[in-house]
Amino acid sequence: MKRWERLIFRLFTVIARCPFGLLYRLSDLLAFILNYIVRYRKAIIRGNMRKSLPKFSEEKIRCVQRLFYRNLSDYIFETLSCLRLNFETLQKRVEYEGIEFFEKYHSEKKNVFLLIGHLFNWEWLISLGPKLPQKQTYAIYKPINTSLINQLMNTIRGRFGTINLPLAQSVRSLMQLPNDGEHVFLVLGDQSPQKRKIRYSLPFLNQETGVYNGFDKIARKKNMRILYGNILRKKRGHYIIRFVPIEAQGKKFRENEIAEKFFALLEVNILEQPDNWLWSHRRWKHQKGIDF
């Protein structure tokens, strides 16, 4: 990292030591700045919501947007808190339902794909690994150009033993590792793919959406087990993560069936708490019939 990045990283570690009461006061301040002063990606957020939530009135969309800024700010400070949070504290703030599915797949000697969306706070899934019977948990991620953020994510996700696996290396690693029930792969499956990599599209939140389907191909080829991580905000700073099995309609998954079922579950999850999804990313920047 560059010198200025090291200085900022040290500042992050100082912020991480603050009690949650102070962190959430800082979060309130940041949310106000993002919403009313910087107006962070407001046009993108409002446009995404209008297209995805056509039954919502303008007043309700403004309400969801206001709550979204608060949740986004909470996500930032909660993520920074992971630099110092111990496992016991996280256990009090994240409630898991469906851990028995991991135990079942471990006994069947099948590796697991855990598919999640950008629902706050997905980073607190770092507390999952020590609770599982599997030996190793991997987080598949796409590195970004800022070494500061990469270092932050590597530090946070590795605190309880999760290995960060860059997207470019993930296919080879997945194909080489034995399907022996000892490995869990966490995948944020709702990212916007590069235009040249779109191989499949489906209806999602009232729009035709280009999606990554690499996890679908690998899971079918390796005969892995699939879980969806349904994330709900119980109250501020407390979450329920429910694991839902994704199973084939017939004896085997047909092509793209996993992707279709994942996005169907994700849509239900988002509509249950629409302010808790990352509306600020340009999820529909590539349009069917124009870009793919």
Image (spheres, rainbow, N blue to C red):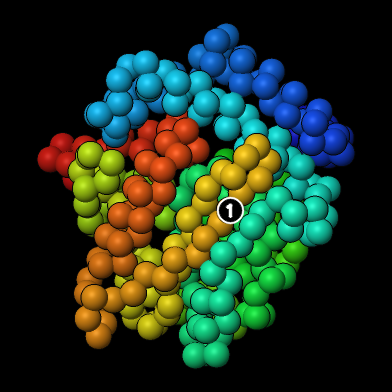
Image position, residue 200 (x, y; %): 22, 56
Q: Can residue 166 be seen in this snapshot?
A: no
Image position, residue 79 (x, y; %): 69, 42
Q: Can residue 29 be seen in this snapshot?
A: yes
**Residue in the picture at 81% in, 59% down:** 88
Dividing the picture into quadrants, the one containing residue 214 is bottom left
**Residue in the picture at 70% in, 35% down:** 77
**Residue in the picture at 57% in, 43% down:** 233
Dividing the picture into quadrants, the one containing residue 288 is top left
Q: Nearer the viewer, residue 80 or 86?
A: 86
Q: Up-down: is 240 above or below 114?
A: above
Q: Quadrant of the N terminus?
A: top right
What type is the residue that disc 1 sits on? Ile
| Residue identifier under label 1 | 240
Q: Quadrant of the C terminus?
A: top left
**Residue in the picture at 62% in, 29% down:** 73
Image position, residue 168 (x, y; %): 48, 61
In the displayed structure image, the side of residue 78 where residue 213 appears, left or right: left
Q: Residues within 10 Å of mark 1 (few under 14, many from 20)?
A: some
Q: Up-down: is 91 above or below 36?
A: below
